[in-house]
Amino acid sequence: MASEEDEIPVYFFYGFMDSGKTTLVKETLFENGFADDLDRFLLIVCEDGDEEYDEKAINAIGGTLVTIENEEDFTEENLQKLTDAYKPEAVFIEYNGTWEVGPIYEMDGPKDWTIVQALATVDATTFEMYMLNMRTMMSEQLFKADVVIFNRCPDDVKKAKFRANVKSVNRRAQIVYLREDGTIDDRPEELPFDINTDPIEITDADYALWFSDCMDHPDKYNGKDVHFTALVYNPKEGKGKLKPGTIVPGRFAMTCCVQDIQFLGMKCKYPKSDEIGHKSWIDLTAKVKNEFAKEYRGKGPVLYPLEIKPTNKPEDELVYFN
C-alpha cells in the first residue's frame, strides 16, 4: 500500500459522447483552478467528441495530453508506462462512454494510483430514451460515480424520476442538475404522488420512486401514513429468519435488466409477525417513523402497521424506476 505522500490521485470522468465530459474536464482544470497546485499532471482522453482540447493550453498549466483510442489498450501495463514516463502528480481520465467501467476497479494498479473521485455526465434531454433502450449501458456509466451531473436540464426536468433511476444502481451518488445555461437548478423535486394526503397513496407505478425518495429523505415522511401493496419477506427458518416482531414488506424492482432484479423492502415492526406468511401479498397501511435501525446502520424509515389485509398478487409483480 502506498503511503499518502506517494499516492497519485486519479479523477475519472464518465458519460456518453456529447454528454458534457470534455466541458467538465476543462472547467475543472482551467476555471476551477484544480491544476494550480500541480507541477505535472496527466490527462488521458479515450474518445474524440465535438469539444476538443487545446494541447498547448494543457501544456501551459503543466499537463500532458495522451489519447487511448482502443479499449484493449486501456490496460494496467500501458497506464503504468504512462505513469513511469510522465511521473504525474495527478491523473485525469476522460473515459469512453461505450467502454466497460467495471474492469477499471478490478485493476491492481498502476502503482500508487488512487481513484479519489468519479464523475458521470448525463444529457438530460436523452436520459429517458437511453434508460429505456440502452439501460445496461447507461447504468454502466452510473454505478461507480461519486457525482452524477445532469446537463442541459429543461424547466420541466423530471428530477425525482432521474434521481430514482440513478439511486437504483448507485445509492451513494450525489446528483447535480444544470440548466441549459450551465447554472445549477436547485428547485425541489416534484413527485407523482401527493405526500400531503392521509394516507399517502403509493401505486405500483410509483412504488420504486417512493421507496427511493423515502430512503433518501426519511424525515420528509416521518409521522406520515402510507398505503401500498406489498410482498412480505418473512422466512420462518434458515439464516434469513427475522427476529420476532419484524417483517419486511416491499416489492421486487427491475433496475438494469432481468438479471438485475432487486427487492426494495423496509423494516416493519409488527407484534403479530408470525401470522404473516413469507412471500404473502398484503394491502398495507402503515405509519412511517424515521428512527435508528441497525439494518440501516443509522436512522431510516421504519414502518408501523395500522392495517394489514391479505390481497391478491398484482398482474405485474415487478415495479420499475421508469
Image: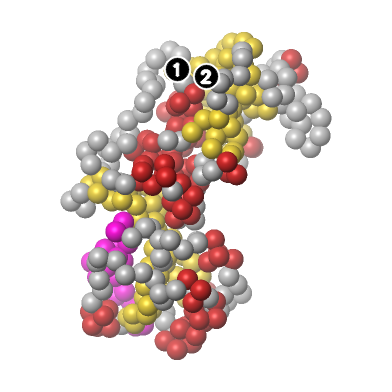
In the rendered image, the vertical position of residue 210 relative to residue 180, given as above or below: above
Q: Quadrant of the C terminus?
A: top left
Residue extending furthest toward the right: 237
At label 2, counting other C-alpha atoms closer than 10 Å, the crowd grade (few under 14, some 14-19, many 20 or more) is: some
Q: Residues within 10 Å of mark 1 (few under 14, many from 20)?
A: some
Q: Nearer the viewer, residue 238 or 310?
A: 310
Alpha carbon separation for disc pair 2 and 1: 7 Å
Find residue 57 and report its image quarter. Answer: bottom left
Q: Is residue 174 above or below residue 66?
A: above
Reply yes or no: does residue 251 show up in magenta: no
Q: In the current view of this chain or complex, which residue is farthest to the bottom? A: 85
Q: What is the span of residues highlighted in magenta in the rendered image?
A: 18-41
* Residue 287 percent across, percent down from the top left: 53, 18
> Is the residue 220 above or below the residue 20 in the image?
above
Residue drawn at the location 32% of the way across and 36% of the way down: 158
Q: Secondary structure at mark 1?
A: strand
To which residue does mark 2 refer?
228
Q: Earlier in the sequence, mark 2 or mark 1?
A: 1
The verdict on residue 23 being magenta is yes
Residue 263 location in percent, x, y?
60, 35
Give residue 238's position: percent from left, percent from top: 81, 34
Classify residue 229 as left or right of residue 199.
right
Tag 2 near tag 1, CB within 8 Å: yes
Q: Indicate the amino acid at tag 2.
A: Phe
Q: Secondary structure at mark 2?
A: strand
- Residue marked by disc 1: 201
Residue at the location (43% across, 38% down)? 164
- Is residue 199 in view? yes
Q: Residue at x 64, y 19 (%)?
A: 281
Q: Tag 1: residue type?
A: Glu
